[in-house]
Image: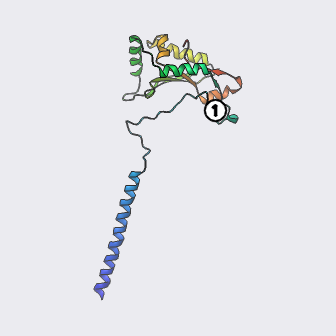
Amino acid sequence: MRKKKEDIFVIILAAILVVIVFGIVFTIITSQQQPQNKLTATSTIITPKTPSPTISENTAGGVPPLTYDKAASQKLLDYIDNRRALSSSDTFAKANILSLLPSGQQSGIVYQSSNIIIEYISSADVFQTEILTTDIQAAKNEANAWFREHGVSQKGICTLPVEFYMNHDVANTMRQENLTFSPLPNGC
């Protein structure tokens, strides 16, 4: 009789152990099937930074802080969709600017000041310039001068292309000015 009780006890322990092992295996398998939110070195996330003139934001009753110039926005889209060839000097200047990216990075900030942040977006092959000041023309002038100092021609600034967008908080401070904002650089 004692032997049977020991055998039953061992069988119950073995069954519990088998259930635990199957539970662990099931957990591992289901966690591998769920999409991972981790980024790898080859992951590319495209985050549009330039607000679309047709999208209204959920602030102040759905009214965006700025109105984007529709014709200028269309022209910018044309520069992006229908790429023009860069001159050899502009191609060389672009390569020099891209060498300012952090080592091993394909996208990132190439210039930053208190007025602007110029960032290269590899996936879209554009330079986005965030305006951090209410003096829009001064910010555009600074960005223009920076590109010119790095060897890009005035035509090349348009052709790269370089696009501008307002920092959201700054745009909100300008809400009452009824401003129409152009995302294009000077002279484009």
Which residue is located at x 37 percent, y 56 percent? 29
Which residue is located at x 41 percent, y 11 percent? 87
Q: Is residue 184 above or below residue 16?
A: above
Q: Secondary structure at mark 1?
A: loop
Q: Position of residue 149 (x, y in %)?
A: 46, 12
- Which sits in the foreground, 117 or 163? 163
Q: Position of residue 171 (x, y in %)?
A: 63, 27
Q: Residues within 10 Å of mark 1 (few under 14, many from 20)?
A: some
The answer to which image quadrant residue 106 occupies is top left
The colour scheme of the drawn protein is rainbow
Q: Position of residue 55 (x, y in %)?
A: 61, 32
**Quadrant containing the C terminus in the rendered view:** top right
Q: Is residue 118 left or right of residue 28?
A: right
| Amino acid carrying mark 1 in the image | Ser
Count of marks overlaid on the render: 1
The answer to which image quadrant residue 100 occupies is top left
Which residue is located at x 44 percent, y 44 percent? 37
Q: Residue furthest bottom?
A: 1
Residue 183 shows in this picture: no
Q: Position of residue 139 (x, y in %)?
A: 57, 18
Residue 137 shows in this picture: yes
**Quadrant containing the N terminus in the rendered view:** bottom left
Q: Is residue 179 left or right of residue 81?
A: right
Residue tagged 1: 56
Which residue is located at x 61 percent, y 27 percent? 53
Q: Residue furthest left?
A: 3
